[in-house]
Image (cartoon, rainbow, N blue to C red):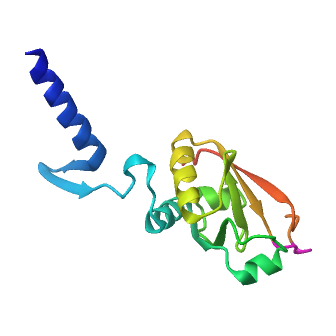
Amino acid sequence: MRKGLNVFQTIGSLAAMTLLIAVCGGVVEIYAAPSQENGKMTDDDAVRLGEEFGIIVGPVDEEIQQELKMQKAEGVVVFEVIGGTQADLAGIKVRAVIKEIDKVEVRTLSDFGRALRRAMPTCNFTVGTYEPADPETQGVGGVMNFHFVGCKRD
């Protein structure tokens, strides 16, 4: 009997890790989980998590690197901030480069996705960004700015 329980526990654990089952009106739908087994994160998965958070992101390009006088093209650039989202409420700006999420360094889209995936369930975390210098905004260009992300309340 004990061996049977271990087999079912193992099968249940594997199923829970790879599938999300939603029961809606008596109909069972099965969705494939994103490619995140063993901590793996694809660029597409990272972009989707960014959208869930409220930003459209991509890798840092040469233009952004030069504008912010960055030595290396590392981090994730924010191309758009979706209004009313956690990212918007935290004050994250367009053309900001995300370098850190909750004290975890971000160099690539995959780093961004893994750090955001860990931080979002906690609801309260920080996002460190470099932002273009602009006299009309309060952000200081060329230095790290920290944005507090709080729980979104209705």
Q: Residue at x 19, y 54 (%)?
A: 30
- Quarter where residue 84 is shown: bottom right
Q: Tell whether 73 sits left or right of 26.
A: right
Q: Position of residue 79 (x, y in %)?
A: 63, 76
Picture quadrant where residue 135 is located: bottom right
- Residue 25 in the image, given as x and y percentages of width and height: 15, 50
Q: Residue at x 22, y 43 (%)?
A: 15
Figure check: 27 above or below 151: below
User: Residue 28 or 42: which is nearer the viewer?
Assistant: 42
Q: In the image, which residues are magenta? A: 132-136
Which residue is the extreme one toward the right?
135
Residue 41 in which image quadrant:
bottom left
Marker count (numbered): 0
Q: How far from the left and from the top, in percent, is residue 153?
A: 57, 46
Q: Main secondary structure of the magenta part?
A: loop
Relative placement, left or right, of 89 versus 42 is right
Q: Say which quadrant the N terminus sits in.
A: top left
Pick whichever, 140 or 98, lies toward us.
98
